[in-house]
Image (tube, rainbow, N blue to C red):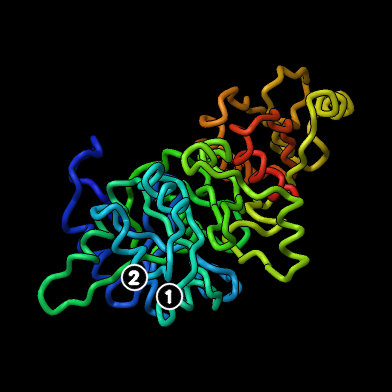
Amino acid sequence: MILSAYLFADGVELAPDSIAVCADAIRAGELMGLPTETVYGLGADADNATAVAKVFAAKGRPADHPLIVHVASFDGGMGGVAHFAQQVPAFAQQLMSAFWPGPLTLILPRRDGVGAAAAGGQNSIGLRCPDHPVAQAVLSALRKPAAGQDVVWGIAAPSANRFGRVSPTTAAHVQSELGDALPILDGGPCEVGIESTIIDCTRGAPVLLRPGAITATQVEQACGRKLLSKEELLAQEQRGLVAPKASGTLESHYAPHAKVRLMDAKALQTALDMLGNDLPKGESRATIAVYARTPLKSKSKQLLLRTMPGDAAVAAHELFSLLREFDDAGVKLIWVETPPAGMAWDGVRDRLQRASA
């Protein structure tokens, strides 16, 4: 069930009845589809173990694979952080000040007795303050309940899709994955389009666990600390300090049904040159999608061609929606030109590498 989050098509004034329906669902231990600036999330009360179990079941996600908990912004996110986190290093405070609300998740030591199921049983927990008016309206309603209602300190919300598949960036994507029964707040297409950057703050210095729209350089500049190098991380692991598990860091993830293959422009053109002009016998539509920045030449009817933007942020915004479009078109293969080097492309490159694994 898709509910408009706005009163009018201009997407400015929030619809209080829709916000209330979804806040009530969360408070009652039910699930909801929630828009954020990154991707749509499948939300539940982060302190309600039964509700969190429903999230794992709906996604088909292993229960030891932690969820990110989203907190309200009206107090700078500090109320939610104080509830869930045992301690907050100074560099993590600086990152919150610089990037919250926004597409940054911080892994922090977890307080005993809170969010255990959402954390996958770990003694750390991932916290984020989303930069989306609809998500914040729901979070605010849960933090400021009517008389007789309990406070909900945070929403555990992984991407609202089957585990390992392409993340949703519209309400329609969520509905197609998880069905009509789920209440979904339609806040429009997600602005960022890929999941948040994740920084582990439990090891004395910032550690990048997943790249996103906020780059490693931005993190280092904001907190005045260098990210731990691979060599330093290896040394820690040899001393028994194992990295916490985090969302979206499995080798194979974000995968469409079609097989994704990354190639440089030369290899991509060579592959196209080997194709015949006509469709394979028994096929009535394109079987191969191509997503590339470099102009390519081919007269083959087997191809569905799309141009990759030259701007990393624009490419991130459209990436998951485009992978879903290719699946909907029924292609069997997706050939993608490897994104350029450079930190701005790290998030897009990471998602494509995992999609192709």
Q: Secondary structure at mark 1?
A: loop
Please name the residue shown 33% across and 50% down the image. Answer: 186
Residue located farthest toward the left when viewing the structure as drawn = 147
Please name the residue shown 78% across and 20% down the image. Answer: 298
Please name the residue shown 27% across and 64% down the image. Answer: 22
The answer to whether residue 59 of the structure is visible from this angle is yes
Residue 72's quadrant in the figure? bottom left
Residue 185 position (above or below residue 192): below
Instruction: Using residue 325 as the reference point, say whether residue 255 is left or right of it.
Output: right
Q: Nearer the viewer, residue 57 or 232?
A: 232
Residue 237 position (above or below residue 292): below
Please name the residue shown 58% across and 25% down the image. Answer: 309
Instruction: Using residue 177 as the reference point, say whether residue 270 is left or right of it.
Output: right
Amino acid at dot 1: Arg
- Percent from the top left, x then y, of residue 354? 70, 50
Q: CA–CA distance between discs 2 and 1?
A: 8 Å
Q: Secondary structure at mark 2?
A: helix
Mark closer to the chain start, 2 or 1: 2
Instruction: Using residue 328 as the reference point, say whether residue 117 is left or right of it.
Output: left
Mark 2 highlights which residue?
Answer: 83
The answer to whether residue 181 of the structure is visible from this angle is no
Residue 111: mark: 1
